[in-house]
C-alpha cells in the first residue's frame, strides 16, 4: 500500500506519448471506483488508474482529498489506443454514465472531490469536450444544464494500491453491489458494441 509520501505524480510528458496510437484521457465523474469499473470494460482502453487531479496540493492522501481541502477531484487516468477507440467515444461514455448536471455531487457522494470534470491533454481534447458539452446543453438531453468542468490537465497523483481495480477485486462489498454493479450493468447494455470481447 502506498503512503502519502510515496504517492506518484505523473507529469504531462510521462502520460502523453507520441509512440504509435496510444493516448491519455483524464476524467472525474464522482467516485473513481465507479469510473474505473466502467472504462476498464471498453474495447481499446489499455489501462485505467484511479487518482487525483485538478487541485493545488502535491502528493495528496485519500483522507485529505475526502476532506475537500486539496482542490483535487477523484479521477481516472485512461490510457487508450486511438486506433480502436477515439476521445469522442470516451466522452460519450463519460457523459452517459454519470449525472453531469449536479454540482460537486454524484448520488450520495458530495464535495468538490466528486465533481464532473474533463482535464484535457491537448487542444483537440479541449475542443471536443467543449463542443460535446455545448451540444448536450442545446439538445435539452438533461433537464438542468451540464456543469462539467473543462480544464487543462496539469498533474495526476495515483491513489493507493487498494483503490486500483477496486470493483474487480471487491465485487462482494456492499458499495460495489449496490452502487457500482448497477452502473456497470446499465453501461454494458447501452454500450454493448464498445465492450471488450
Image (cartoon, rainbow, N blue to C red):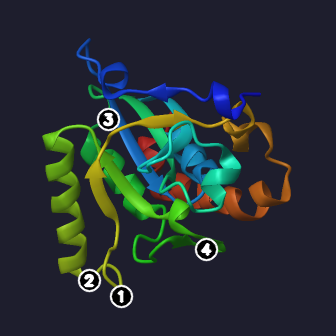
Camera-side mark, 1 or 4: 4
- Sequence order check, earlier mark of 2 and 4: 4
Residue 94 visible in the shown view: yes
Residue at mark 2:
140
Question: Distance of mark 1 from mark 2, alpha carbons?
Answer: 6 Å
Is the residue 47 above or below the residue 56 in the image? Answer: above
The residue identified by callout 4 is 107
Q: Residue furthest top?
A: 19
Mark whose residue sits in front, 4 or 3: 4
Query: Badge 1: few (under 14), some or many (20 or more) residues near its Cα, within 10 Å?
Result: few
Q: Residue beneath label 3, please?
A: 85
Q: Residue at x 35, y 32 (%)?
A: 24
Q: Residue at x 47, y 57 (%)?
A: 71
The residue sitting at 25% across, 72% down in the picture is: 136
Mark 1 lies on a secondary structure that is loop
Q: Which mark is residue 143?
A: 1
Q: How far apart, in angstroms, are the residues tagged by discs 2 and 3? A: 26 Å
Q: Secondary structure at mark 3?
A: loop
Chain-order first, disc 4 or disc 3: 3
Which mark is first along the chain, 3 or 2? 3
**Structural distance between the alpha carbons of marks 4 and 3:** 28 Å
Amino acid at each position: 500500500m502506498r503512503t502519502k509520501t510515496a504517492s506518484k505524480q505523473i507529469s504531462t510528458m510521462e502520460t502523453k506519448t507520441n509512440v504509435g496510437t496510444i493516448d491519455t484521457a483524464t476524467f472525474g465523474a464522482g467516485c473513481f471506483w465507479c469510473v474505473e469499473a466502467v472504462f476498464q470494460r471498453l474495447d481499446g482502453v489499455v489501462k485505467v488508474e484511479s487518482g487525483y487531479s485538478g487541485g493545488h496540493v502535491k502528493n495528496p492522501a485519500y483522507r485529505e482529498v475526502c476532506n475537500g481541502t486539496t482542490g483535487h477531484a477523484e479521477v481516472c487516468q485512461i490510457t487508450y489506443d486511438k486506433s480502436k477507440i477515439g476521445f469522442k467515444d470516451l466522452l460519450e461514455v463519460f457523459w452517459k454514465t454519470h449525472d453531469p448536471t449536479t454540482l460537486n455531487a454524484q448520488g450520495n457522494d458530495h464535495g468538490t472531490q466528486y465533481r464532473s470534470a474533463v482535464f484535457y491533454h491537448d487542444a483537440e481534447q479541449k475542443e471536443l469536450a467543449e463542443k460535446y458539452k455545448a451540444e448536450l446543453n442545446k439538445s435539452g438531453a438533461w433537464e438542468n444544464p451540464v456543469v462539467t468542468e473543462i480544464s487543462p490537465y496539469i498533474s495526476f497523483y495515483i491513489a493507493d494500491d487498494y483503490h486500483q481495480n477496486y470493483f474487480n477485486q471487491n465485487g462482494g462489498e456492499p458499495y460495489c453491489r449496490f452502487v457500482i454493479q448497477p452502473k456497470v450493468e446499465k453501461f454494458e447494455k447501452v454500450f454493448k458494441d464498445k465492450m471488450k470481447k
